[in-house]
Every structure is written in structure tokens, then in C-alpha cells.
Image (cartoon, rainbow, N blue to C red):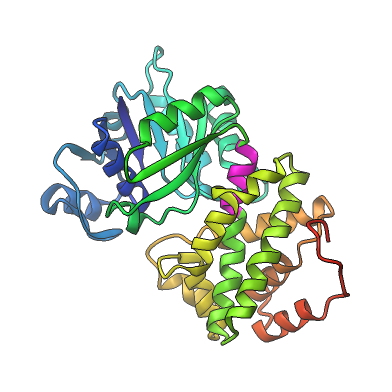
Amino acid sequence: MKTAIIGTGSWGTALSLVLNQNGHRVTCWTIEEDVLRDIKEKKENIKYLPGVKVPESVIITGSLEESLLNAEMIVLSVPSQVTGQVVPKIKEFLKADQDPVWVSVAKGIENKTYRRISRVIEETGQIPAGRIGVLSGPSHAEEVGRKIPTAIVSASSELQTARLIQSIFKNTFFRVYASDDITGVELGGALKNIIALAAGICDGAGFGDNTKAALMTRGLAEIKRLGVKLGANEETFAGLSGMGDLIVTCMSRHSRNRYVGEQIGKGKTLDEVLAGMVMVAEGVKTTVSAYELSIKHEVEMPITEQIYLTMFENKPAYEAMIDLMSRSSKIENWDK
């Protein structure tokens, strides 16, 4: 299959290696001249995925039109908040008879519109929902690029599309499950980044493993509450795109969101942390969307609320933790 990967950060590069390994023709597009040069000349994405060789059979280009020529599948690996700007540009270069499958690998919720990224693609590109899928789950690019065994989920409103994406990406080190709960898969991938910010703050502020375990467990409960309110299946959040992704993002040294939280926990401001980063931490802007959605739909999300206050209203991490611990007593269940 002729595949175009739009955006050649760490994840786009890692997925290009998976597809190349599986025998597909892969063309990657990047707007960054240093990335283009390094992959062409040094066969390595030094900026985003250092130490991993990119074979010559993976084509890299700075021309969006060239990358989309005869593409049967388009993998969107750009930050969630710019997807709505990129999709119309892609549509300009597609031929009238091109009907590619679109695959989103971003994990976010668009600010102000509160759209999941598959909905952004559908509405800004006038693309049938059944031709759109997502890939999500516990999958750090640094490990996928080195062929470390990984399992993720392919989801679409049309199970046939999810299965097609599954068949294209699946191999011996990259196992793909299929789902028709695209709402739950996308929300799990987006919302867990907020809890990863909390886990990082926990680390940076010097709290312990007990604290982080509590944040992760209760964080999953509030992810589920909002997800079900927005139409997701509750069971999805117990799977790879929910609990699985939550675990890896909260615990891993590779996690950008956990890193941002850790630095805030150590006393830095959000602006200071983001100024020193090359890659995007999707959880920062997703926190705004999730906090506003919780108010709009009257869904109790205390951890999300405290992360919002800590990051955007400079509430000290210790005070946020005290407020969480001092909430009224509850009976433990998935609804409280």
C-alpha cells in the first residue's frame, strides 16, 4: 500500500519504520528542513528519534504534493491542535479519484470546539467517518523505533476500516487490536495525558509511589466518567487505549507529559518548561478542553481540575494535593 505520513516527529518516523518493515511504500512529509536533511543525508531523525536508522526505502520529502501522490492511506502525525489546518491543505492535492483511508495518531481534544481529532478530520476535510481511523495505546516512539514489542488499538466507526488499518500495521513486534469504539479509544489516549501531568507533578514535588498509584487509579475513574458521558463504551477504558496508555505515560521516562508535570512539581512555571522543549506535550492543551468539558457536562473530574489550576493559575502543587486528599469521603466505585 502507498502510504503518506504527514509529520515526521518521533512517532511519525517510528510508524514509517513499521510500515516499511511490513513491505508498504512509505513517503514522509516534513516542514522542518533540518529533519529533511538529516534523514536524507544521515539516514536518521536526529532531532526527534536519535539512534534509530531510517532505511533508504523510506522516502522523505518537503513537498506535500509529492508525499500524497497516489497515496492509499494518509497517516496524520501532526499535533492535535493544528490538524484542522493541515487537512484542508492535504485535500487540495488529492486527485478526484483518490479515496484514501485516513489514520490519526494524535492524542488530543481540539480547544474551543472540543472535537476529537477524527471529528476534526471528518469535518474540515468533508471525509466520510467510515474512512477515518485512529491508532492509540501504550506506544512510545523511542521503543517502537527499536522494535520493542508493543500492542496498540486501531479504531474506527466502521470495524472494517479498523481491521484494514490493523492488517497494514500489525507485525511480530507491533501487535494491533481492532475496535469500533473510536470515541473511547480517542478519549482514552487524550485524557490520560492529563493524569500523566499529575504523575509528573507527584514526582517533581517529592510525593511517593502511593500517591502516584492513587492518582492513576482515580484518574482512570474520571477519564471513564467523561468518556461515557461523551458516548464511549466503559469497557474501552480498561483496555490498551485506556489503562494501558495511562500506565506507560505516567511511569515512563520517555513521557513528555510526565516530564512537564515533573518540572512544574519542582517549581518551574509552565512557560519555562515549554520553552525548553522540542516536542509537543499534548496534555497541556487537552487539560483546558477536558476541564471545560467537565463543567459543560457536569462531570466530576477533581484531578483534572487541580491540574488545570496548577498549570494555568499557578496553584502550588502541595496545595492541589491537599485539596484532593481533603475532598468529602466517598464509597469507592466507578461513579464517585
- Quadrant in which residue 294 is drawn: bottom right
Where residue 141 sits in the image (x, y, percent)? 36, 54
Residue 186 seen: yes
Helix, strand or loop: magenta stretch: helix
Q: Residue at x 71, y 72 (%)?
A: 306
Q: Residue at x 40, y 36 (%)?
A: 75
- Between residue 124 and residue 145, name the one nearer to us: 145
In the depicted structure, whether residue 323 falls above or below residue 103: below
Magenta residues, start to end: 182-190
In the rendered image, which quarter contains the N terminus? top left
- Quadrant in which residue 56 is drawn: top left
Q: Residue furthest left?
A: 41
- Between residue 131 and residue 61, name the one nearer to us: 131
**320 left or right, relative to 255:** right
Q: Residue at x 33, y 58 (%)?
A: 142
In the depicted structure, whether residue 282 falls above or below residue 211: above
Q: Residue furthest top?
A: 97
